[in-house]
Image: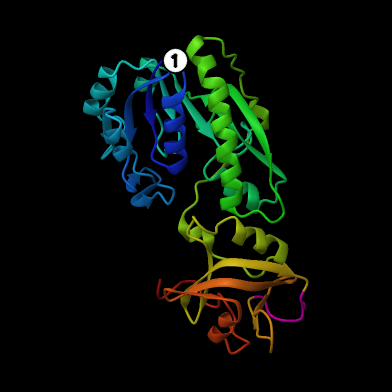
């Protein structure tokens, strides 16, 4: 089967490397994108924090490559892709819809990090962690005109553990995804794969997220804020608040019961131990933060506070 790979992420690169090793699979072309690009829902531009230099991989392996600089509907781009004579597209780590014209040329198969039809849409793993889900997964499916709505080739579940960060969860999801591809891409190539329609009544669509969505509401309970921080830590831009009107990113924290008589966002500075922040219910102990370009851990976090400050007192950052 002649595959044109479409993707621009580290996970996409791992899938591409796997494809090259599978019998009966011939990668005849690659479409990728730069780290920062423009998309319909964010005209100012998006930075792909999971970006990988797939164009370099293509050059190193003598595979024809096209780097998206404009629209997926560019007729010159389509003419180049058509010239590669694909039997199928494999789409992994891609933010753009695949045009119908492409899908009429050859079926497009994508990977989505959820158990479709649930958690369709943007940032499914982040949303699953924020929402306190106990399970997520990854799905290999055939794309159609909708957002993550096409028939399912296969999917596999993965547990979300109480101490997971987005990085630890994503690593396991990547591995499950590679296993899906290894087991089912050859079946697609041989025509033996059995696709199953999604149940629309079970669909929940998650909105796209931007770095600005990481602002912490200290009025929430500590359990929620703990998940909120773990769901957006590295490699993502991080959950954040403000200190003296400047951004304070919280990379690592843990929840505690705390004292509920303090104001949400109030910093409690102990004589020994961690700095704590009061929440609407419970408290958050700060383990690693970043402020004005410097990372603080352990006892050094106390250097930032006198005690009694109210984090997030301003609704905007005056300095990134």
Frontmost residue, 180 versus 239: 180
User: Which residues are the magenta region?
Assistant: 258-264
How was this image coloured? Answer: rainbow
The secondary structure that most of the magenta stretch takes on is: loop
The residue shown at (61%, 39%) is 119
The residue shown at (62%, 28%) is 155
Residue 320 can be seen in this image: yes
Residue ID for mark 1:
24
Residue 213, x across and y down, in percent:
51, 58
The residue shown at (61%, 58%) is 230
Frontmost residue, 27 versus 38: 27
The residue shown at (60%, 50%) is 168
Left or right? Give the position of 179 relative to 84. right
Which image quadrant for residue 184?
A: top right
Q: Is residue 193 above or below residue 206?
A: above
Frontmost residue, 61 versus 199: 61
Residue 181, x across and y down, in percent:
53, 26
Residue 220, x across and y down, in percent:
68, 65
Toward the top, the furthest residue is 191
Residue 61, x across and y down, in percent:
30, 31
Residue 120 can be seen in this image: no
Which image quadrant for residue 172?
A: top right
- Does the magenta run of residues contain 120? no
Left or right? Give the position of 16 relative to 152. left
């Amino acid at each position: 089967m002649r595959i044109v790979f479409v993707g621009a992420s580290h996970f996409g690169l791992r899938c591409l490397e796997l494809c090259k090793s599978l019998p009966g699979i011939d990668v005849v072309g690659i479409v990728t994108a730069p780290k920062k690009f423009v998309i319909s829902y964010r005209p100012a531009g998006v930075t792909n924090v999971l970006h990988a230099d797939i164009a370099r991989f293509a050059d190193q392996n003598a595979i024809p490559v096209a780097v998206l600089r404009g629209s997926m509907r560019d007729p010159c781009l389509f003419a180049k892709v058509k010239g590669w004579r694909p039997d199928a597209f494999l789409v992994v780590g891609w933010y753009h819809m695949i045009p119908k014209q492409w899908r009429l040329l050859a079926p497009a198969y994508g990977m989505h990090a959820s158990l479709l039809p649930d958690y369709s849409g943007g940032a499914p793993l982040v949303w699953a962690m924020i929402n306190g889900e106990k399970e997520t997964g990854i799905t290999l499916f055939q794309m159609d005109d909708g957002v993550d709505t096409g028939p399912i080739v296969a999917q596999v579940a993965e547990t979300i553990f109480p101490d997971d960060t987005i990085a630890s969860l994503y690593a396991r999801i990547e591995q499950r995804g590679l296993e899906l591809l290894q087991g089912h891409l050859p079946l697609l190539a041989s025509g033996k794969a059995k696709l199953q329609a999604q149940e629309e009544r079970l669909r929940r669509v998650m909105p796209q997220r931007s770095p600005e969505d990481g602002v912490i509401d200290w009025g929430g309970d500590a359990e929620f804020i703990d998940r909120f921080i773990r769901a957006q830590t590295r490699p993502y831009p991080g959950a954040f608040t403000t200190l003296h009107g400047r951004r304070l990113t919280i990379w690592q924290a843990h929840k505690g019961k705390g004292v509920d008589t303090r104001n949400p966002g109030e910093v409690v500075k102990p004589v020994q131990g961690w700095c704590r922040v009061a929440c609407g219910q419970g408290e958050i102990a700060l383990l690693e933060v970043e402020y004005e370009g410097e990372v603080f851990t352990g006892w050094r976090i106390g250097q930032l506070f006198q005690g009694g400050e109210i984090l997030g007192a301003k609704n905007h950052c005056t300095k990134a």
